[in-house]
Image: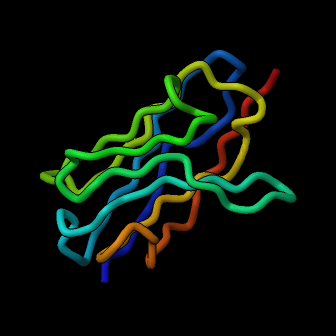
Amino acid sequence: QVQLVESGGGLVQAGGSLRLSCAASGGTFRSYAMSWFRQAPGKEREIVARISSSGGGTYTADSVKGRFTISRDNAKNTVYLQMTSLKPEDTAVYYCGAARTGIVPTTWGQGTQVTVSS
């Protein structure tokens, strides 16, 4: 079972950029499809982006398309979320998730807070 630890969150002004990282350990990282989700206060957790186990296929939610990019480095057991042109509505706790089969994560990290000020 893989364990996940996110990092890279913080406070940034609108229009700024952040790169989130999610480091995996304890499993065969290259076997997992990886996702980034986010949850804002009072809202449900929502998908932000997803990447296949090989990195050859990605999905990005319409709300962040053109601004956020998901990538992975299987040699480093890490998945990234590059976020640019950040908006206040991007403020949320960001979670990475791992799916051994299918696309629905069964393992989650602890989350990292992203706060975008206007």
The answer to whether residue 96 is left or right of residue 99 is right
Along the line of sight, the residue nearer the viewer: 43 or 73 = 43
Q: Which residue lies at the image location 47% right of the left edge and 56% below the top edge?
A: 6
| Vertical position of residue 4 compared to residue 55: above or below | below
Q: Quadrant of the C terminus?
A: top right
The answer to whether residue 62 is left or right of residue 74 is right
Q: In which quadrant of the rendered view does residue 80 lie?
A: top left
Along the line of sight, the residue nearer the viewer: 62 or 94 = 62
Residue projecting furthest to the bottom: 1
The answer to whether residue 95 is left or right of residue 32 is right
Q: Position of residue 20 (x, y in %)?
A: 46, 42
Q: Which residue lies at the image location 45% right of the left edge and 78% below the top edge?
A: 106
Q: Position of residue 95 (x, y in %)?
A: 55, 58
Q: Position of residue 23 (x, y in %)?
A: 34, 58
Along the line of sight, the residue nearer the viewer: 85 or 109 = 85
Q: In which quadrant of the rendered view does residue 11 lie?
A: top right
